[in-house]
Amino acid sequence: MKHLSYKNKSLQFNGADLATIAKKHRTPFFLYSEETLVGNYQEFAKGAQAAGLIDPLVCFALKSNPNRELLRTLAAQGSGADIVSGGELRRALEAGIPPEKIVFSGVGKTEEEILFALKAAKKGIFSFNVESIEELDLINSCARRLRKRARICFRLNPVVKPKTHKFISTGNKTHKFGLLEADILTAVRSPRFWTNSQLVGLSVHIGSQLLDLGATRRGIARLCEVALKTNIQLEFLDVGGGLGVDYDPEDSQKLPAVADYMALVAATVEKHFNSRSLYRPRIVFEPGRRIVARAGILVMKVLRNKVSEDNHFVIVDGGMNDFMRPSLYGAYHALLPVKQAKADRTCHVVGPICETSDCFGSDRQLPAMKSGDLIVLCDTGAYGYSMGSNYNLRGRPKEILMNRKKKLRIVNQAQPYEELL
Ligand SMILES: *Cc1c(COP(=O)(O)O)cnc(C)c1O
């Protein structure tokens, strides 16, 4: 990991000494690197261009990390936003992301949220990624009330057909996301939905933390097929997010490079779409994790050790309320001691929350650590703070941003107890 390395046996984050930083800030805290964030965004945006995609639009998925300063940084780089609530829409606008670069996803948009999005700018937002026919109906009637035109994109549920694939992945049709092809095509041909709406795109998002591009390719291929069947010249195709991260070094081999992903998107669209049509749609992306996961760490302190026969527990001051992924998905995240020493102990690193699942790592090889020693949970920039909670009446942790000149700035204060009441 190039942003995390040891110097004089002390862990450095983008060249800054973590022990020194932790002297000034109470643990646990999130620390983000602007350099890594911008680097990841640029790799993505430039990768899309290098693959020959025309005017690609990268809409950062806010749910992965909605921190204001990180968003301002991304906005300055030209990023758009993929949002899933009125709160996220407000946050994106506040951070300076223009409405014409905002896509609104999610199965449960409320009338209030739809009206707010329509009013966000003269022409409204870039698109409503519509997930049901009732939603389409509601958006159209909201737009009529406001005397506006809503820009609509259908989210396709790209069910794999049994004749091409023996095994239908279970839950495809029982999945709450997206619309089936037939329902999209029926809606396209029903004039009553389009009095104040216009179909401008189609989207697909097949999942997250994808390391195998096979399913991505099949999803995009289906997207192209359905787009052609609409017989409408669509402005764009939105290929969603989902590109994974090698949280576990064992996944490094499998991890698709951004350049390969972009080449696959370009080739799939070319193959299925452009050969049968003269126009070329713009390609929209909705990455979250790939942009921000690596840009953040969670710095924690060891509270104490506890031994239950052959189980050695290292109890730290961060918990599953600060970072949910290990307890929620059994996700692997590397743990690094700030003081480098021989890793001669097998331990479970656990938090203070009263849940057995409050464990950041089982059977990890770590050096002996004592009360007050610092430990870092790696790659916590995505789905970290945003999924956090006040469980066990614990305040939310501080967030610190290291800018490109290695200056630190608190971008979110630790939540005071008074706010919890
Ligand atoms: C969560 C989500 C994303 C982002 O997914 P990542 O795996 O973080 O890239 C993009 N689009 C939609 C519709 C989502 O729900």
Image (cartoon, rainbow, N blue to C red):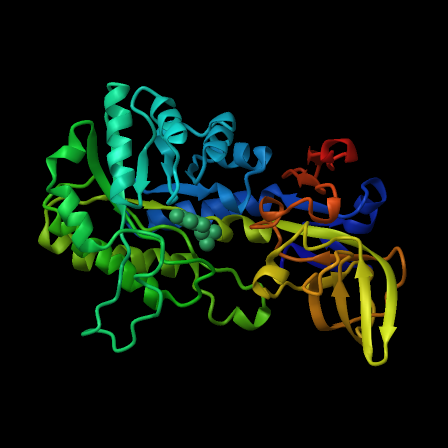
- In this rendering, the answer to whether 48 lies above or below 310 is above
| Quarter of the N terminus within the rendering | bottom right
Q: How many marks?
A: 0
- In this rendering, the answer to whether 223 lies above or below 45 is below
Q: Where is residue 379 drawn, in percent x and y?
A: 61, 56
- In this rendering, the answer to whether 313 lies above or below 241 is below
Viewer-nearest residue: 193 or 14: 193
Res 62 visible: yes
Instruction: Decide if residue 371 is on the left or right side of residue 12.
Output: right
| Residue that lies at the very extreme toward the right in this rendered image | 371
Q: Within the image, what quadrant is residue 6 found in?
A: bottom right
- Residue visible at 85% across and 80% down? 309
Q: Where is residue 275 drawn, in percent x and y?
A: 12, 55
Instruction: Decide if residue 121 is on the left or right side of residue 372.
Output: left
- In this rendering, the answer to whether 361 lies above or below 140 is below
Q: Where is residue 73 drawn, in percent x and y?
A: 54, 35
Q: Within the image, what quadrant is residue 414 found in?
A: top right
| Quarter of the C terminus within the rendering | top right
- Residue visible at 70% across and 41% down? 396
Q: Within the image, what quadrant is residue 315 found in?
A: bottom right
Q: Where is residue 393 drawn, in percent x and y?
A: 74, 44
Res 236 visible: no
- Residue visible at 74% across and 49% down? 392
- Residue visible at 80% across and 41% down? 25
Viewer-nearest residue: 342 or 388: 388
